[in-house]
Image: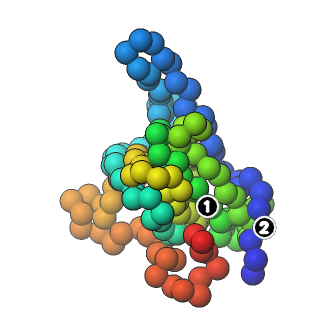
Amino acid sequence: MPFRPTELEGVEIRPLNRHADERGWLAEIFRSDDVGPEGMPVMGYLSVTKPGESRGPHEHVQQTDWFCFPGPGTFEVRMWDNRPRSTTYTLGQTRVVGGSEPAMILIPPGVVHGYRNIGDEQAMVLNFPNRLYAGEGRREPVDEIRHEVDARSPFQMQ
């Protein structure tokens, strides 16, 4: 089944509004008064991706991801709606973020997602998911369906 491009239901892309002065800049990533309790982050992590490399695509059953692409590196983010009850089921969305377009992307459960560093240098991504990786004390199964391990998957980064 081909995925057609559009904006996906439940995916939020928010620009990072930089507040600059002579020292540099600051941007809010999220605020508790902007997030419902079901999406409130419970942990955070940082990853660095080499030029030309991808992470994903994968999806979560329960987890919402709050990705932050602050720059200076640039990423192509691909998302596919794999939720049968969604109004955008079978549709896809691609966005270039970071660099000159710093952004936050909220990705709800059931939206397959991945990103690729399309720049010339290592690039940083922050994520603030609403579920703990492997649960309390890292004793639960990881909430992740890894499509990148299936060469026949319709979800491809290239």
Whole-angstrom CA distance, mark 2 to mark 1, is 12 Å
Instruction: Specify which label sits upstream in the sequence, 2 or 1.
Output: 2
Q: Residue 4 has which mark?
A: 2
Disc number for residue 87: none
Residue 85 found in image quarter: bottom right
Residue 138 visible in the current orientation: yes
Q: Please state which of residues 68 and 134 is positioned toward the viewer in this rendering.
A: 68
Q: Is 15 left, or right, of 122 in this rendering?
A: right
Residue 108: percent from the left, percent from the top?
A: 57, 55
Q: Residues within 10 Å of mark 2 (few under 14, many from 20)?
A: few
Crowd around label 1: few <14 · some 14–19 · many ≥20 (10 Å): many
Camera-side residue of 6 and 137: 6
> How far across and how far down the image is residue 27, in percent?
47, 26
Residue drawn at x 69%, y 58% is 93
Q: Position of residue 79 (x, y in %)?
A: 62, 61
The quarter of the picture where the N terminus appears is bottom right
Please state if 41 lies on the left or on the right of 99 as rendered: left
The quadrant in which the C terminus is found is bottom right
**Mark 1 sits on what residue?**
78
Amino acid marked by disc 2: Arg
SS state under label 1: strand
Q: Can see residue 62?
A: no
